[in-house]
Image (cartoon, rainbow, N blue to C red):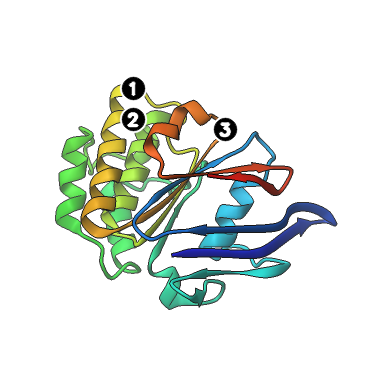
Amino acid sequence: MIQINKVTKSFYKKSVLNEVDAKIERGSICGLIGSNGAGKSTLLRCISGVYKPLSGEILVDGQIVYENPDVKQKIFFLADEFYFPKNADMEHMAKFYKSYYLAYDIDYFHSLCETFCLNPENKLQSFSKEMRRQAAMVLALASRPEVLLLDESFDGLNPEVKDTMRQLLCRDVADRAMTVLLSSHSLREIQDLCDQLLFLHDGKILLDQ
């Protein structure tokens, strides 16, 4: 379970999150809906432990996330702009993540590469933007996280790839009770996938349904 209790966050005295409250049950898919600048990415970074809230707290399975390596081991945050080192291929990245995520599944990684028709030995810099998004999702799912945070991860993908990603997410939620928090600026994009929807506007949750 993810618990977000009165979380505030600001940058250079500009408020980005304002006493955000939410609870996301284990084994569910939650959509975080909001326009650009609503605070979605900042909230995901706070949940992942990248940012420390100015006030309030975020707990995963009852434990504070920030500066807690044991909890962070359970979480994979897939940012909208995903960074790959220069000249890296997917095999290199898989080995990198395996050194951190104890549950990393190399066999599943190779299976996912086949599913998305990605050659893990090709340089990632040679991939198109859509292929890099697919590669990032493969690396995330192979980490076998308990909590998967996705920031606009369906953006720019063709319908067939989106459908494949949806099926994979639903399978991991059903099989492993993985919890997914998926941000999007488009309600239509994800509403049929989600068990819960959070509507974020100007750093506040306007609706939780």
Dot 2 or dot 3: first in sequence order is: 2
Q: Is residue 48 left or right of residue 148?
A: right
Identify which amino acid the numbered label 1 is placed on: Pro
In the picture as drawn, the residue positioned furthest to the right comes out as: 13
| Along the viewing direction, whichever of 103 and 95 lies nearer the viewer | 103
- Mark 2 → mark 3, Cα distance in angstroms: 16 Å
Q: Which residue is mark 1?
A: 159
* Mark number, residue 202: none
Closer to us: 6 or 36: 6
Please rate how many residues cluster around mark 3, counting C-alpha atoms within 10 Å: few if below 14, some from 14 to 19, many from 20: many
Res. 122 in view? yes
Q: Label 1 neighbourhood size at 10 Å, few (<14), some (14-19), many (20+)?
A: few
Of the residues shown, which amino acid type is indicated by label 3? His
**In this rendering, would 4 be left or right of 147?**
right
Residue 151 is situated, as x and y percent measured from the top left of the image, at: 50, 44
Residue at the location (21% across, 41% down)? 113
Which quarter shows the N terminus? bottom left
The picture quadrant where one finds residue 34 is top right
Residue 160, compared with residue 4, is above or below; it is above
Q: Which mark is residue 185?
A: 3
Q: Are marks 1 and 2 in contact (CB under 8 Å)?
A: yes
The residue where tag 2 is placed is 162
Which secondary structure lies at badge 1? helix
Q: Amino acid type of disc 2?
A: Lys
Q: Element at badge 2?
A: helix
Q: Position of residue 180 (x, y in %)?
A: 40, 51
Real-space CA distance between mark 1 and mark 2, rounded to the nearest whole angstrom: 5 Å
Percent position of residue 142, x then y: 26, 54
Asked if residue 60 is positioned above or below residue 111 in the image, the reply reads below
Report the residue at 36% width, 22% height from top.
158
Q: Which of the 4 quarters of the picture holds residue 125? A: top left
Label 3 to label 1: alpha-carbon separation:
17 Å
